[in-house]
Image (spheres, rainbow, N blue to C red):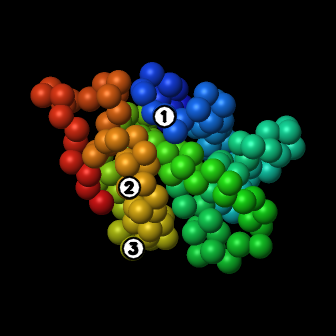
């Protein structure tokens, strides 16, 4: 799952990822899709729905990550709901990593390449759907996360993958 992969980052030697940041990332990864359960009709971006819940619980440092993960701000713009966005992006590195983890984890929790995830989104929503367009629009954020993590594909060193030779998967948009 996205959360399990975020938790594995603690084991990597990432100088920029301080323990408190790692804890926020893990909590955001665990709760990033809470809005889907609260709003099954998808009446607004699920990140915003989940972030409001986190705000109400006093998790004010986690809410912005949940609110804006995986291009939710872009989705709000496309749906004419930008006025509902009340969170600031104070931690762009954590947001980029959360988006990367979300984009490289399938709906059933498996590690997938960016191409596989995009293909799945396009199959479910359509090749020219807003969901596919947003996925494409977040690629610069994903590339930033890959640089931060020191990787070139979807896999983290501790991911169970089919890379029998130990090499990273090639990045695919």
Mark 1, mark 3: which one is toward the viewer? 1
The one of 126 and 6 positioned closer to us in this rendering: 6
Q: Which of marks 1 and 2 is in front?
A: 1
Locate residue 30: give its quadrant: top right
* Other residues around mark 2 within 10 Å, as few (<14) / some (14–19) / many (≥20): some
Q: Distance between the residues labelled 1 and 3?
A: 39 Å
Q: Which is more N-terminal, label 3 or label 2?
A: 3
Residue of label 2: 143
Q: Where is residue 115 in the image (x, y as percent from the top left)?
A: 28, 54
User: Label 3: few (<14), some or many (≥20) within 10 Å?
Assistant: few
Residue 38 seen anywhere in this rendered image of the structure: no
User: Of discs 2 and 3, which sits in the foreground?
Assistant: 2
Q: Can residue 148 be seen in this view?
A: yes
Image x and y of residue 22, in percent: 59, 32
Per the model, the C-alpha gap separating discs 1 and 2 is 18 Å
> In the shown orientation, is residue 163 left or right of residue 78?
left
Identify the disc placed on residue 15.
1
Q: Mark 3 points at which residue?
A: 128
Which residue is found at the position 30% from the left and 60% from the top? Answer: 173
Q: Residue at x 78, y 63 (%)?
A: 86
* For marks 1 and 3 on the same chain, the one whose residue lies earlier in the sequence: 1
**Would you say 88 lies left or right of 95 here?**
right
Left or right, 67 with reference to 9 = right
The furthest residue to the front: 15
Give SS at disc 1.
Answer: loop
Q: Which residue is drawn at 57% across and 45% down?
A: 94
Estimate the x, y position of residue 75 in percent, counting from the top left: 58, 67
């Amino acid at each position: 799952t996205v959360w399990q992969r975020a938790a594995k980052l603690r084991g990597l030697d990432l100088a920029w990822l301080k323990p408190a940041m790692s804890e926020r990332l893990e909590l955001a990864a665990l709760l990033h899709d809470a809005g889907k359960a609260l709003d099954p009709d998808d009446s607004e971006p699920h990140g915003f729905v989940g972030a409001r819940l986190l705000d109400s619980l006093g998790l004010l440092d986690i809410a912005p990550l949940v609110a804006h993960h995986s291009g939710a701000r872009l989705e709000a713009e496309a749906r004419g709901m930008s006025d509902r966005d009340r969170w600031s992006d104070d931690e762009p590195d954590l947001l980029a990593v959360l988006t990367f983890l979300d984009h490289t984890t399938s709906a059933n929790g498996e590690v997938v390449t960016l191409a596989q995830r995009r293909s799945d989104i396009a199959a479910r929503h359509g090749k020219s759907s807003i969901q596919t367009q947003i996925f494409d629009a977040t690629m610069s954020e994903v590339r930033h996360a890959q640089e931060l993590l020191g990787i070139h594909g979807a896999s983290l060193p501790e991911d169970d993958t089919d890379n029998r030779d130990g090499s990273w998967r090639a990045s695919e948009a």
